[in-house]
Image (tube, rainbow, N blue to C red):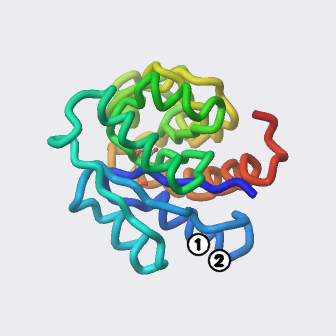
Amino acid sequence: MHKYAVLVSGRGSNLEAIINSVKKGIVPSMPSMVLTDNSSAKALEFAKKAGIETCFVDPKLHKGKKRMGDEIVRLLKAKGIDTICLAGFMRIIGKNVVEAFPRRIINIHPSLLPMFPGLEAQRQALDAGAAVSGCTVHFVDEGIDTGTIIEQSRVDVLKNDTVETLSARILEREHAVYPRVLASLLNGSLLS
Ligand code: GRF
């Protein structure tokens, strides 16, 4: 049975969707840990309410990508966790973490990669005049949103869309797609 951690930095709506999907039987188990680099992340409230262990890795105490990564690997391995689900974790994952969890780290990004990687993907889509955007679940490598794509879902960009309206429609799609992909990684039906 795979054990997984969800890594968060902020709002936590994808974490909430994962927790709800566990309750509905779509995802086979609750996260063994919710780990954050931001002690005031709202996501922690969802974790605590669901009785999930939380862990704050303080970037001020573990300076730099390598040290932060070493600490994350240490904490997760100590719990027997073998799978990582990034859900709004606002940090680039280091080589040490990628190598410690080969093909077992996934992320969701609010665009159809390889279009619009990095920050403010929805704004990038609007600025580019894209007619379609969406979300992408991908394996995580050392690059920024460059890992192998697992699943994508298209969302039309409407004529009067703002960053807020487009983001909200993409987010709704994320909440449906991400738990399903996570489930397939956990139950072995996704070849990793
Ligand atoms: C989502 O838009 C996700 O695609 C991106 O970060 C955002 C996280 O939102 N990687 P939330 O914290 O899950 O609400």
Q: Is residue 60 above or below residue 47?
A: above
Q: Which mark is residue 30?
A: none
Tally of numbered discs: 2
Q: Position of residue 157 (x, y in %)?
A: 49, 39
Name the residue at the front extreme: 78
Contact check, label 1 and label 2, Cβ < 8 Å: yes
Q: Is residue 121 above or below residue 147?
A: below
Q: Position of residue 86 (x, y in %)?
A: 48, 45
Quadrant (top left, top right, bottom left, bottom right) of the C terminus: top right
Kind of residue sitting beneath label 1: Asn
Kind of residue sitting beneath label 2: Lys
Give the SS element for disc 2: helix
Mark 1: few/some/many CA within 10 Å (<14, 14-19, 20+): some
Q: Position of residue 18 (x, y in %)?
A: 57, 63
Q: Which residue is mark 2?
A: 23
In the image, 41: left or right of 114?
A: left
Assess mark 2: CB under 8 A from ligand 1? no
Q: Decide which of 154, 178 is in the foreground and name it.
A: 178
Q: Position of residue 9 (x, y in %)?
A: 32, 51
Q: Decide which of 181, 110 is in the foreground and name it.
A: 181
Residue at horizontal 58 percent and vertical 36 percent from the top: 136
Q: Quadrant of residue 65?
A: top left
Q: Is residue 3 above or below residue 26?
A: above
Q: Decide which of 38, 130 is in the foreground and name it.
A: 38
In the image, 66: left or right of 13?
A: left
Q: Which residue is mark 1?
A: 20
Residue at horizontal 21 percent and vertical 62 percent from the top: 40
